[in-house]
Each structure stands twice: as structure tokens, then as C-alpha cells.
Image (cartoon, helix red, strand yellow):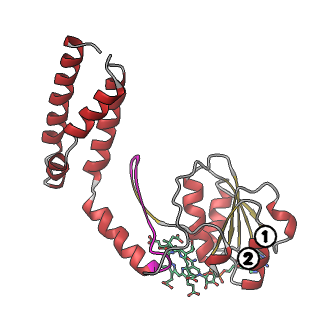
Amino acid sequence: MQQNSFSYPAMLDLKNKKCVIIGGGKVAVRKALPLIEAGADLTVIAPEADPQLLALAKTSLLRLELRAYTDNDLLDTFVTVAATDDFHINRKIAAAAPCLCNVVTEPSLGNFSVPSTVKNGALIFTLSTGGMPALTRILAQDLRAYYGSDFAEFNEFLQQLRQELKAVDTTPEKRTAFWRQTLTQSVIDLLHAGKLDQAKEIITDAANRFRLESQNSPR
Ligand SMILES: C[C@@]1(CC(=O)O)C2=NC(=C\c3[nH]c(c(CCC(=O)O)c3CC(=O)O)Cc3[nH]c(c(CC(=O)O)c3CCC(=O)O)/C=C3\N/C(=C\2)[C@@H](CCC(=O)O)[C@]3(C)CC(=O)O)/[C@H]1CCC(=O)O
Ligand SMILES: NC(=O)c1ccc[n+]([C@@H]2O[C@H](COP(=O)([O-])OP(=O)(O)OC[C@H]3O[C@@H](n4cnc5c(N)ncnc54)[C@H](O)[C@@H]3O)[C@@H](O)[C@H]2O)c1
């Protein structure tokens, strides 16, 4: 079975991190948007840029430098994207990148690939096929349809409750057992059936019982 060479998934916090995209075409636009959404300190360098990048530069969401790449451009850069249509230049960029590097023409020269992302509030699914983007795209649509907005709301509800239950005077083992016993496949099935309120009710009732039991039998 063929392996995905980008085999270590990670979720990065790029807020205010220096990120640079070299190249200003359609692919650069696609790579820029999620970096902006992540709050990166983004610079795009290219002699010619797509109108969408020009518009983003006007609203200060990125810095645009309309010129060719030079080897000094990547100093202290956390994420580099080599997105030109010239594979010789992309190779030079890959060799000079000091940290994380994505290469759009020859992905294996970089050290990360960009997965497809399905975002719903704090709930994020990422997806990688190891180099079959058309399949990645359609599977992402499938995930988006299967896990609708109720799952984001349920996640938020659970996180709030989790914080509350962390304050209950009990052991971490009992808390873990509570979540394992309460958050079951049948609750997830209720969400798939559009019964979010019923799912919340089951969890709330179980949490109330857990609070009472913890009060009555302190650790
Ligand atoms: C997920 C997504 C994220 C993103 O980039 O934003 C992504 N590509 C997307 C779209 C897309 N990519 C391509 C087309 C044109 C149609 C086609 O050719 O299929 C379209 C548009 C479309 O499909 O509509 C062509 C293409 N892609 C790569 C090469 C080079 C090569 O393979 O050598 C070439 C050929 C260039 C050529 O032919 O010259 C390489 C990579 N593209 C990856 C990710 C990484 C592997 C992800 C994985 O393993 O699953 C990897 C390895 C590296 C990377 O770029 O990080 C995004 C889907 C967004 C969504 O979710 O809708
Ligand atoms: N990885 C992917 O997801 C993916 C998807 C589609 C295409 N591609 C490949 O990515 C490449 C770019 O695609 P595109 O559609 O954005 O191309 P494009 O032709 O629209 O854009 C190329 C950009 O690179 C810039 N550029 C060229 N030489 C440069 C240099 N020396 N310094 C800085 N910038 C320079 C150009 O000014 C232009 O802005 C193509 O080779 C394409 O085959 C990759």
C-alpha cells in the first residue's frame, strides 16, 4: 500500500507568525486565504499578482512586494510557500526556507503539504490523500455534509460542560470514566438524526447525576 510521505499531522497556531508566499497566481491566492484566516503576518512576493492578492494588500491583510524572489526573503520565516510556476525558483526557495516549507510544483521538496480543511466553529477536520487533490476535495465535501453545524454547537456545549465538571471534586479517572460512559455512539447517532436537543439533555442529565454522586461519595 502506498504511504503518504507527509505522515505527521499537526494543528499550528500561526497568529502573528512570519509567513511568506513566493508567487502571486491562483495557487498563491488559495494558499494565502487560510494563512490570513489563521492570523499570520503574511508577505507575498511576486513580480505580478492576481487581482485578489492586490485587493487583500489594500485592506492590509497581507503585504505585497511586486518583485522577483531573492534569497534574503526568507530570514526568520516560520512558514514558506513556494508557489511560483518556475520549478527552478521553487527549488531554490525550498533549499533556503529556514523552517516549514510547502512547494506547490514538487511537493516532496518541501516538509509539509496543505490538507483540505472542513471547519465548523472549533471543530476542524483535515484531510490528506497523499497527492490526489480531486479526491481530497470530494471527500471534504462528504465530511462537510455528514458533520453539519449541529456538531459544532454540540462541541461548544460539551467544552463548556467539561470546564464545569473539571471543578467537581472528584478524581481524573472518574471524570474520564464519566465521559467514556456518557458520550457514546448512540448520542452521536442522535445528532445525525437531527436531535441535538435530545443529545444535550442526555448529557446534561448524566452530568447532574455525576455532580450528585461526587458530592455524596467524595474521593
Ligand atoms: C487540499 C488542497 C489544499 C490547497 O492547496 O489549498 C491541495 N490541493 C488542492 C487543490 C488543487 N490542487 C491541484 C488542483 C488542479 C487540479 C488537479 O491537478 O488535480 C487543485 C484544484 C482543484 O482540485 O479544484 C493540483 C495540484 N496539487 C498538487 C500538485 C503538484 C503535484 O501533485 O505534484 C498539483 C498539480 C499541478 C500540475 O498539474 O501542474 C499538490 C498538492 N496539493 C495539495 C493540496 C497537497 C496534497 C493534498 C493531499 O494529499 O490530499 C499537495 C501534494 C501539496 C500542496 O500543495 O500542499 C486543495 C484542495 C482544496 C479543497 O479542499 O477543495
Ligand atoms: N500544489 C497545488 O495545489 C497546485 C495546484 C495547481 C497548480 N499547481 C502548480 O503551481 C504553480 C503555480 O500555479 P498558478 O496557477 O498560481 O500559476 P500562475 O502562472 O498563475 O502564477 C505564477 C506566479 O509566480 C510568479 N513568479 C514567477 N517567477 C517568480 C519569481 N522568480 N519570483 C517570484 N514570483 C515569481 C508570477 O509572477 C506569478 O504571480 C504551477 O506550476 C502549477 O502547475 C499547484
- Residue drawn 33% across and 24% down? 164
Amino acid bearing label 1:
Leu
Cα–Cα span, label 2 and label 1: 6 Å
Residue 161 can be seen in this image: no
Tell me the residue that label 2 is attached to: 48
Q: In which quarter of the image is residue 203?
A: top left
Quick one: SS at disc 1? loop
18, above or below 110, in the image: above
Choose between 155 and 206: the one closer to the eye.
206
Amino acid bearing label 2:
Glu
Q: Please say if the residues under marks 2 and 1 sit with CB atoms less than 8 Å apart.
A: yes
Q: Quadrant of the C terminus?
A: top left
Question: Within 8 Å of ligand 2, the CB of disc 1?
Answer: no
Residue 184 can be seen in this image: yes
Q: In this view, does 105 lie to the left or right of 9?
A: right
Instruction: Please state the total of marks drawn on the protein image.
Output: 2
Question: Within 8 Å of ligand 2, the CB of disc 2?
Answer: yes
Q: Is residue 208 left or right of residue 111?
A: left
Mark positioned earlier in the residue sequence (2 or 1): 2
Instruction: Tell me where the magenta segment starts and ends, as one range.
Output: 120-133
Tell me the residue that label 1 is attached to: 66
